[in-house]
Amino acid sequence: MVQTLLDNKADVNAKSESYGIALQAASSKGHEKVVQMLLNNKADVNAKSKPYGIALQAASSRGHEKVVQTLLINGANINAQCGYYGTALQAASSGGHDKAVQMLLDNGANINAQCEYYGTALQVASSGGHDKAVQTLLNNGADINAQYGYHDTAWQEGSLGGYDGVEQMLLDDGAIDDAQGQGLDRGLYNTQEDYEYEMQVDVPREDDVLLI
């Protein structure tokens, strides 16, 4: 079907408000062959649109390693900051996709890149209790006491989530256990949903993704 549309001169970079471009939709679902087909037909690998940012962030957020590699080979900007996730590394870390995290780091991802919502990759991995991703980031030199964005330090996030294993892992690596959050004032945002509403964050949902 995709090839038929392309053969009939479909605009490969046409944007949809819900899905971004076709490359982002295919990347988010891990459709490697479709991704390569679109790239072969001049899809813009670094096209930006909501909610994902670029295709690399969409693929990383779901841990689609083969698609991540394909996009990197075709020139994806590994440190692009846009969309809901910030960078591809933060997107992979948010889902606890440790293999995708390592792949991105091996290809030059900025381990301590910060964005307003997520903070750093280590902060968001810790907030989800993703111990393997946390360990991968620590092994690669992540700033363990960084404070930025909606999230507090990585240790505080692990503690707040009740993730004892992550909390202890961070303490063992030198986390400060009494750091005071200096990011956004959580007093203004009682929940993550409050923050997203106030900041008009576009959150990718599973049922928002075009099925290709």
Image: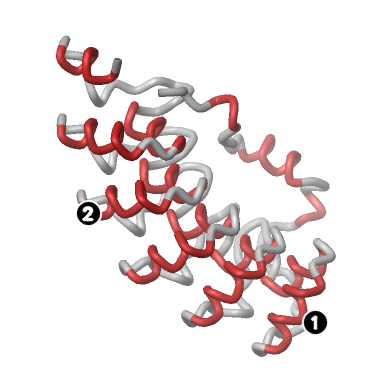
The residue positioned 36% from the left and 59% from the top of the image is 79
Residues packed near mark 1 inside 10 Å, few (<14), some (14 to 19) or many (20 plus): few
In front: 92, or 80? Answer: 92
Using the rendered view, name the quadrant where residue 7 is placed. Answer: top left
The residue positioned 39% from the left and 69% from the top of the image is 105
In the rendered structure, which disc, 1 or 2, sits on the residue that comes first in sequence?
2
Q: Secondary structure at mark 1?
A: loop
The residue positioned 44% from the left and 48% from the top of the image is 64
Query: Which residue is denoted by mark 2 in the rendering?
Result: 73
Q: Quadrant of the N terminus?
A: top left
Considering only vertical position in the picture, is 177 above or below 132? below
Residue 139, given in percent of the width and then of the height, sits at 52, 82
Considering only vertical position in the picture, is 34 above or below 135? above
Query: Which residue is denoted by mark 1 in the rendering?
Result: 178
Residue 42, given in percent of the width and then of the height, sits at 16, 33
Using the rendered view, name the quadrant where residue 194 is placed. Answer: top right
Residue 207, given in percent of the width and then of the height, sits at 59, 25
In front: 60, or 192? Answer: 60
User: Would you say 20 lies left or right of 129 here?
Assistant: left
Q: Quadrant of the C terminus?
A: top left
Instruction: Specify the amino acid type for callout 1.
Output: Asp
Report, in whole angstroms, how far the alpha carbon at label 1 lies from the one at label 2: 43 Å
Residue 109, given in percent of the width and then of the height, sits at 37, 66
State if disc 2 and disc 1 touch (CB < 8 Å).
no
Considering only vertical position in the picture, is 206 above or below 1? below
User: Would you say 32 lies left or right of 185 here?
Assistant: left
